[in-house]
Image (cartoon, rainbow, N blue to C red):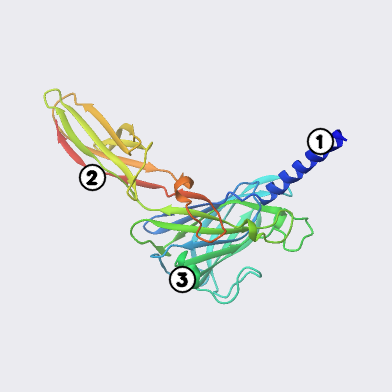
Amino acid sequence: MKTLLRLALVVLAAMAALMLAGNAFATQKLGVRQDPTSLTIKVSQAQSDPQPAKVTVYVPSGYTLNASQAPGTKIGTATGNSFVRDQNIALPLAGDIIVAPPDTNVTGCATGTHLVVWTVDLQVGGQSQKLPVHIDATTGSETALGAYKLVFCLPPADVPKDTPGRSPNGAQLLDATFKIDSVFTAPAGQSIWKAITTPWTPGLAVPNPTATVESRAFVSSGTVSLASKVLSATKRIVKFSGEVTQSGSALPGTQVNLLINDKARFRARTDARGGYSVTLRKTGRKSVTTFQARVTVAERDITATGCGSPSVPGVPCVSATGSPFTAVSRKIKVRI
């Protein structure tokens, strides 16, 4: 009896683990980079996550949208990666983003006439798959999430091969990057993009709304400052210092390049308060030298601070990213 009881407990524990695994929230990520004339949006997930059934990306308030392009106009490109289940291999994907007629829809995803529709013509393993993206101004309670919303839907990937509407060759999206030119104009200051993702139920062609998650992307430009102080005129020693910030917050651990006459010569790394310093001793003849600081900051995970209370009740925020940026300081001329 004790043996049977132990076996029953083991079986129940295994079943509970499987149930928890099936209901685990996906690790969706959203990354956004805003440049003067282009916008880059990246959505990604782990291969162990279920295929997204519907993704809604909210454009923050303050952005303006140019929707004047005629159908057939190319406005950008898309790249990414997918996992093809039927061949058990990972394959890259690529394609152009083309403006489509505003009444282009996907059954079960969107209806009616939209502000604008883009069609992403993806090439995966030599096969073409069109992915419509529906863009509309938000209304009602959705205005709290953003000014516009971009909606796209994907077919289920892990269902039997004969399932109607199955993704071609069981292709599962791992990540996709959309680079859009001359469409969005960003407001000044920091913006917070939000994506609400509902996955398919594992193994079924049925959306799983209870597993819906939110991901966020904080977008803003960054700055690097530079100041100089002569520590010893006779020994010709100068100290250069500054700080790296984004949206007023310090960025510790950032590499700073100190340029001398426009060429990178020395490196420093910011401390916990975002500050850095470099002390130099000049040799050779006296001359006027130009100094400038430059930083290139990659996208980084800020989930711990960026995922506060959920934007939608009952929908957990699972990830947040800080946008990448490149910044240069003012130039300083020193005669020493």
* Mark 1 lies on residue: 6
Secondary structure, mark 2, is loop
Q: Mark 2 to mark 3: distance in Å? A: 39 Å
144 relative to 27, above or below: below
Quadrant (top left/top right/bottom left/bottom right) for the N terminus = top right
The mark found on residue 69 in the picture is: 3
Q: Amino acid at mark 3?
A: Gln
Q: Are marks 1 and 2 in contact (CB under 8 Å)?
A: no
Q: Which residue is mark 2?
A: 330
- Residue 269 location in percent, x, y? 35, 33
The percent position of residue 317, horizontal first and vertical second, equals 53, 53
Residue 228 in sight from this viewpoint: yes
**Residue 212 shown left or right of residue 75 in the figure:** right
Q: Nearer the viewer, mark 1 or mark 2?
A: 1
Give the mark nearest the N terminus, 3 or 1.
1
Q: Which amino acid, mark 2?
A: Arg
Mark in the foreground, 2 or 3: 2
Residue that lies at the very extreme toward the right in this rendered image = 1
Q: Is residue 65 left or right of residue 2?
A: left
Residue at 76 percent across and 45 percent down: it is 15
